[in-house]
Image (cartoon, helix red, strand yellow):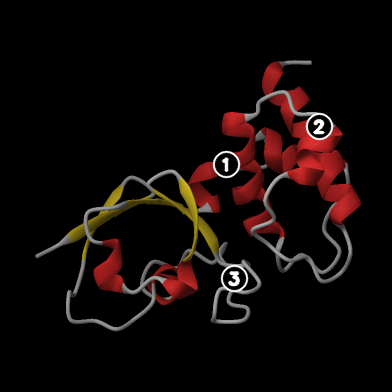
Amino acid sequence: MPTAKINEMDLVLDEGSSESLLSVLRGALHLDGAKQGCDNGSCGHCLVLVDGQPAKACCLSVPEIAGRKILTIEAIAPDDTHPLRRAWREERVANCGHCQSAQMVAAAHFLASSPCPTRRQIQQAPRHVICRCATNPRITHAILRAAALQSGD
């Protein structure tokens, strides 16, 4: 049987399943950080890291994740002391909150390659997630704060 590693746990996959990764995360695994939004990859609210790269969980079927390593927000920023969660809270980013887990996943991926970004670099970075309630300026501030917290500043 094929497997995938989700947040460091091995998951045996049903290779005949047409279920999406998002359905598995939210259903069988009770990991609700990735949100169901558009179901076609447009909004990005279901963003996770697959083999270290941003991917939209609603667009991946169970057979497509065989042999891959998936990280969700629950593993990336596991508690309120994590720099991303702390920065999001301190900058009061969440308005509706629906996209915020995915925004943090995108920020974690960005900060892994740009640990000391400028405001301009953050604003020019690829946008994997759409925020419909206009908290983008706060998200930029939170990413700057998270970078400072991670570096110990």
Q: Earlier in the sequence, mark 3 or mark 1?
A: 3
Q: Position of residue 43 (x, y in %)?
A: 66, 72
Q: Position of residue 78 (x, y in %)?
A: 55, 44
Label 3 and label 2: CA atoms lie apart by 24 Å
Compared to residue 63, the image places residue 16 above or below, namely: below
Label 3 and label 1: CA atoms lie apart by 18 Å
Q: Residue at x 29, y 67 (%)?
A: 64
Q: Secondary structure at mark 2?
A: helix
* Residue that mark 2 sits on: 145
- Of residue 115 and residue 13, the one placed in the foreground of this image is 115
* Residue that mark 3 sits on: 35
Which labelled disc corresponds to residue 109?
1
Residue 26 visible in the displayed image: no
Q: Mark 1 is on which residue type?
A: His
Residue 16 position by quadrant: bottom left
Q: Which residue extends farthest front?
A: 124
- Of residue 71 and residue 41, the one placed in the foreground of this image is 41
62 displayed left or right of 7: left
Q: Mark 3 is on which residue type?
A: Lys
Compared to residue 135, the image places residue 80 above or below, namely: above
Q: Position of residue 26 (x, y in %)?
A: 47, 72
Q: Earlier in the sequence, mark 2 or mark 1?
A: 1
Q: Residue at x 57, y 32 (%)?
A: 112
